[in-house]
Amino acid sequence: MTNKIKVIQYGIGPIGNKVTNYLLERKNIEIVGAVDINPVKFGVDLGKISGAGKELGIRITNNAKELFESTQADVVVVTTTSSLEKIYPQIIEILEYGLHIVSTCEELTYPWITNPELSHEINRLAKEKNAAVLSTGVNPGFLMDFLPAALTAICKDVTKVTVERFQDAQFRRIPFQQKIGAGLSLSEFQKKIEDGSLRHVGLTESIHLIASKLGWKLDKTEDIIEPVIAEQEVKTDSLTIKAGDALGVQQIGIGEKDGKELIRLVFKASIGESNPRDRIIIDGDPQIDSTIKNGINGDIATCAITVNAVASIVKAKPGLRTMADIEPISCFR
Amino acid sequence: MTNKIKVIQYGIGPIGNKVTNYLLERKNIEIVGAVDINPVKFGVDLGKISGAGKELGIRITNNAKELFESTQADVVVVTTTSSLEKIYPQIIEILEYGLHIVSTCEELTYPWITNPELSHEINRLAKEKNAAVLSTGVNPGFLMDFLPAALTAICKDVTKVTVERFQDAQFRRIPFQQKIGAGLSLSEFQKKIEDGSLRHVGLTESIHLIASKLGWKLDKTEDIIEPVIAEQEVKTDSLTIKAGDALGVQQIGIGEKDGKELIRLVFKASIGESNPRDRIIIDGDPQIDSTIKNGINGDIATCAITVNAVASIVKAKPGLRTMADIEPISCFR
């Protein structure tokens, strides 16, 4: 019993709920607390909100500090935000108590280039407190960064890394179809690009992780977002998409050096994508062309790698870690 | 110049030669010495034997001790043997000088279960001397162990791991075709199985690496070797294989618990294999079916990962490391 890793779940939204349920399945993990800033959840039992189907005897608090002071814990799983700026004060507060952190914050997966100042401060404090911080997920965190970088281990030369993550949204839940802009007119789509609600966060972080692992000093990165346009009318159970409207979204991340494209990450999610897959092409010696058939469901995978990372973070070197410099995570249970 | 990693190449056979040539291409690495026990090579310039096409100013010695005493080095790359028993005294001698080790010794890739005594002794001495020891390669070391274990990171459950490494030997060099028994009668093939000259070393180590990463306590492992038999006559540039003779070899590694097969590794190399590939199937949630098209050429890949590991070993935690507990290696140059 005492060997169990004691975890506090911080952020009880859709991802936090799924993570909670996965944590509960693990014999080597014990949930000892839960935090959410939403006052509606204050005092409610975690099991009631997460959908665990039973009370867990853990009341959700909105006072993280008080919880850290009163509860013995090893790791805090933080699923609160995609934004590094927003998660930063939470990270600092947790580190003050010397607790390890596993997060799903996209901008924290590889923040060294995009925000060196906050990265160094997190790293400094984590080392001082003998704690390790890691942000992970399926993307960013695995399929478009860790995995291609790891595949280059068997190459003597690499000239370019290309990743294609193509998903068919046809049979995904309706909120996912909405999230990718399926069914929007091109002007509505454009508005959503401008207000930021359509953007997948993390391509830039993935590019920087790959470049850093390969010793490439990039001088330019791009993150281009555009609609996938229906050539003819498409019907799903819940949507009718007119020809010329959006079937979904395509986002392309590019890393360049001296005007040459070295990294190309293509994330595409649309209704009726004919060849869904996660494909990695390493141009080099040897050439690698690796494909995960049908691709990976992101919701399950992101929550799974987060839970799997809990067992790794307690053994990791103190400091701000990334998937590039922590021992490989596996499904350990 | 002083930032370069100083490497001694230990073992100047076919693999050592290729490694030497790859090391020479790296700006972050400098070769400072070379050892081989073969007296014929003693005093000969490394570049002459490795095929570098020029003298390197490094004379091969058969006195490792003297070299370690007289030369400032960081890492010794050891490509001398597949056998843990045989490499053990070399490892101990190198560790006495506090040097890091990267090896291609198959039985050293994950020796914790097959030979815990030697593993603990290497680990103890390495820690005492503040040095790290890693053995790697494409197989064992990457395709049939590290990579499947790493893919499970995105799974919430795993029930079985299957790896198929199928190679077409049709266009490989003749020594490779001979090594896999192509063209042998079944009785000749059986003799070579019995004298051990046909066996691929490492499946058992790969099984143990996967099991350890997934927290599986196996109670049985098997390593089955059998011929791939020609159904009809097959001709290559150099061979005519009669119907009923061997096209090559198939070796199957199995890991079981409570009579249930949890790990299945199939290594097959034969003339005319119709669908060469490196395929990994993870039965779990989510299911993963990942294929590297045409598979990976083992000679290049093994030497490449060995050279790529040099940059990782100098940063690794002291002790006996494996691909399961060292930060992911990439093609860093």
Image: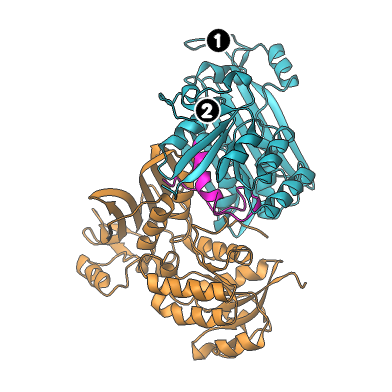
Chain colours: A cyan, B orange
* Residue position marked by numbered label 1 in the rendering: A233
| Chain of the residue that carries numbered disc 1 in the rendered image | A
Circle 2: residue type: Arg
> Can I make out residue A142 in this image?
no
Circle 1: residue type: Glu
| Mark 1 nearby-residue class (10 Å; few <14, some 14–19, many ≥20) | few
Kindly identify which numbered label has been placed on residue A246: none
- At 70% from the left and 54% from the top, the residue drawn is A128
- The Cα atoms of the two marked residues, 2 and 1, are separated by 49 Å
- The local secondary structure at tag 2 comes to loop
Q: For residue A310: magenta?
A: yes
| Mark 2 nearby-residue class (10 Å; few <14, some 14–19, many ≥20) | some
Tell me the quarter of the picture where residue B308 sits: bottom right
Q: Which residues are magenta?
A: A304-333
- B14 or B141: which is nearer to us? B141
Q: For residue A307: magenta?
A: yes
- The local secondary structure at tag 1 comes to loop
